[in-house]
């Protein structure tokens, strides 16, 4: 059937209020702006980055071509009237027949990229799809559009991630600016693409939950509230394997003799909690050795008596990012029915100055009997992690342990927002994490666990080890990792992920994450669990 597009309508550009170009002369209105389509175009840039528009050529995805055929070549005709789209660029066209009120075309990367890109350490095709489809969805912000169908004929998993990550905001009023229903289009889509889309949506939703937990103000996300939110969310999720949540209180933590953890919690009026989340797939039994995930859950880090400068202190509401990403990764494993047995251990407390707080120079005894001289109460994350790592090994004899923690400013100085720093005592764990991050684009970078850093934290004047290194500011991320290494037995495969570098997003470095707490690297953790091989 021939469709009437009103030819002249496509000839002239119009600028929307926010400066985005919209084609043609037709404005969104509540009666027409109901359902949008986002389709992809491959981009070949023969100039390797030169800005000459003639050197850039576009070719439609399979989905684009099918819509183009359906509409008698109108889509490709439209594309001839504008300069070629560059990677990550999105253009919205109005004036389509009843089915769609607008069509947004997005520039994907090359149809034949070098994958994985060895310098960038990610799958270029997937990362460009995330960027492109997020640009498409962002183009529909404030359009009044309520529903959008997305082309899944290329990188469906990444398309879903870009779509659902970019349409999320902490505030409900901001969420409402985006179409409330985002789904894959049937055109150019097969069952594999549909399944990939559904999987990518879960990856993104889990990261969005971590973003919510992290960005929540500390008065609304205390240890108790965090534990309640996690219990409710996990137990109400749709899973096939078994999930359970245990919330242990201060008395249990005392019985466990977690003196390092308690020394952090004691300055606050908010009681600490220790949350355990257990997941066992249908193919596994509770007898199987688990993969254990440990997440730092400091719901607010003022620094304690070694108080932080007030500028930027509000960011420390997200010092429970380790806890948030591990809870979210476990949720992802359960929702995707991934094979294996996975346990998340989450020590939660506030780090506050008060008459009851730990003083610099105090000595505390960790669960494994190690005495620790606490010279800096702001280096608190390693203290609660030390006790959780000790408990994990004694209680569960894990196949491997991963821990995530917004541990040090030093890792942010080293890596910026590009990657999570990984300190691994096992090459296979590192390889598996790296591979997972190439797939998700949420990257990791390996850091050293040299003995030299261990020597910098011991021996101390008053105790077995010090909670800060002798090197002062130098190598701060490495001495923090060395401190944790002290609590991990040599035969336990382990990786510490310092996520302070990726804790927040400025809204530009990763274009599909708006400004705020990032929820990174939840997707990499889920992907790691999906492929986890524990036979070292
Ligand atoms: N809570 C941790 C990390 S605070 C530093 C930070 C900097 C940049 C981005 C995110 C977080 C802490 O207190 N660490 C102590 C230390 O770094 O010495
Ligand atoms: Mg409080
Ligand atoms: Zn928070
Ligand atoms: Zn601190
Ligand atoms: Zn901290």
Image: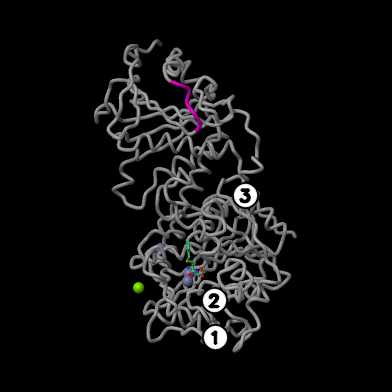
Taking the spot 62% from the left edge, 67% from the top edge, the residue there is 478
Left or right? Give the position of 305 relative to 32.
right
The residue tagged with tag 3: helix, strand or loop? helix
Using the image, determine if residue 471 lies above or below residue 496: below
Left or right? Give the position of 405 relative to 5.
right
Specify the farthest residue to the bottom: 462
- Residue 151: within the magenta? no
Instruction: Read off the magenta span.
Output: 83-87
How far from the left and from the top, in percent, is residue 162?
Answer: 47, 41
Taking the spot 54% from the left edge, 21% from the top edge, the residue there is 57
Instruction: Indicate if the residue with disc 3 has its beta carbon within 8 Å of ligand 1.
Output: no
Task: Kindly identify which numbered label has been placed on residue 364.
Answer: 1
* Mark 2 Cα-neighbour bin, 10 Å: few <14, some 14–19, many ≥20: many
Q: Earlier in the sequence, mark 2 or mark 3?
A: 2
Residue 288 seen in render: no
How far from the left and from the top, in percent, is residue 384?
Answer: 53, 75
Specify the farthest residue to the right: 536
Q: Earlier in the sequence, mark 1 or mark 3?
A: 1
Left or right? Give the position of 359 relative to 454.
left
Residue located beneath label 2 in the image: 383
């Amino acid at each position: 059937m021939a469709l009437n597009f009103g030819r002249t309508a496509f000839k002239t550009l119009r600028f929307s209020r926010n400066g985005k170009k919209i084609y043609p002369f037709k404005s969104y209105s509540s009666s027409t702006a109901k359902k949008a389509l986002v389709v992809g175009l491959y981009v070949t840039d023969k100039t390797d980055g030169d800005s000459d528009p003639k050197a850039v050529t576009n070719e439609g995805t399979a989905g684009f071509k099918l819509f183009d055929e359906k509409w008698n070549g109108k889509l490709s005709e439209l594309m001839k009237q504008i300069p070629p789209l560059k990677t990550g660029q999105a253009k919205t066209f109005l004036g389509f027949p009843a089915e769609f009120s607008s069509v947004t075309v997005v520039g994907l990367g090359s149809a034949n990229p070098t994958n994985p890109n060895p310098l960038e350490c990610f799958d270029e095709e997937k990362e460009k799809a995330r960027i492109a489809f997020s640009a498409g969805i962002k183009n529909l912000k404030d359009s009044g559009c309520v529903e959008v169908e997305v082309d899944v004929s290329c990188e469906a998993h990444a398309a879903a991630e870009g779509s659902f990550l970019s349409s999320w905001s902490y505030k409900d009023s901001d969420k409402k600016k985006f179409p409330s229903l985002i789904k894959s289009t049937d055109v150019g889509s097969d069952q594999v693409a549909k399944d990939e889309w559904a999987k990518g949506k879960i990856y993104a939703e889990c990261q969005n939950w971590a973003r919510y937990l992290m960005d929540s103000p500390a008065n609304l996300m205390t240890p108790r509230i965090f534990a309640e939110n996690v219990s409710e969310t996990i137990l109400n999720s749709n899973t096939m394997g078994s999930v359970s949540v245990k919330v242990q209180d201060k008395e249990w933590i005392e019985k466990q003799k977690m003196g390092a953890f308690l020394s952090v919690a004691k300055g606050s009026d908010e009681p600490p909690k220790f949350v355990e989340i257990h997941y066992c797939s249908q193919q596994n039994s509770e007898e199987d050795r688990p993969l254990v995930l440990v997440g730092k859950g400091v719901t607010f880090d003022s620094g304690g008596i070694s108080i932080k400068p007030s500028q930027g202190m509000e960011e420390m509401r997200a010092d429970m990012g380790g806890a948030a990403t591990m809870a979210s990764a476990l949720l992802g494993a359960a929702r995707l029915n991934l094979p294996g047995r996975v346990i998340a251990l989450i020590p939660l407390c506030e780090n506050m100055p008060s008459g009851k707080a730990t003083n610099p120079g105090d000595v505390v005894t960790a669960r494994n009997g190690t005495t620790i001289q606490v010279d800096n109460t702001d280096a608190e994350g390693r203290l609660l992690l030390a006790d959780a790592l000790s408990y994990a090994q004694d209680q569960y004899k894990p196949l491997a342990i991963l821990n995530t923690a917004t541990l040090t400013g030093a890792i942010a100085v080293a890596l910026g927002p590009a990657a999570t720093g990984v300190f691994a005592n096992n090459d296979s764990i590192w390889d598996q994490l790296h591979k997972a991050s190439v797939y998700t684009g949420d990257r990791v970078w390996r850091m050293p666990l040299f003995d030299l850093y261990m020597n910098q934290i011991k021996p101390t004047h008053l105790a077995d080890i010090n909670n800060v290194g002798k090197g002062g500011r130098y190598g701060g991320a490495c001495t923090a990792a060395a401190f944790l290494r002290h609590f991990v037995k040599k035969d336990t495969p382990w990786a510490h992920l310092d996520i302070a570098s990726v804790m927040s997003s400025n809204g530009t470095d990763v274009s599909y994450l708006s400004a705020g707490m990032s929820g990174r690297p939840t997707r990499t953790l889920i992907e790691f669990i999906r492929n986890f091989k524990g036979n070292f």
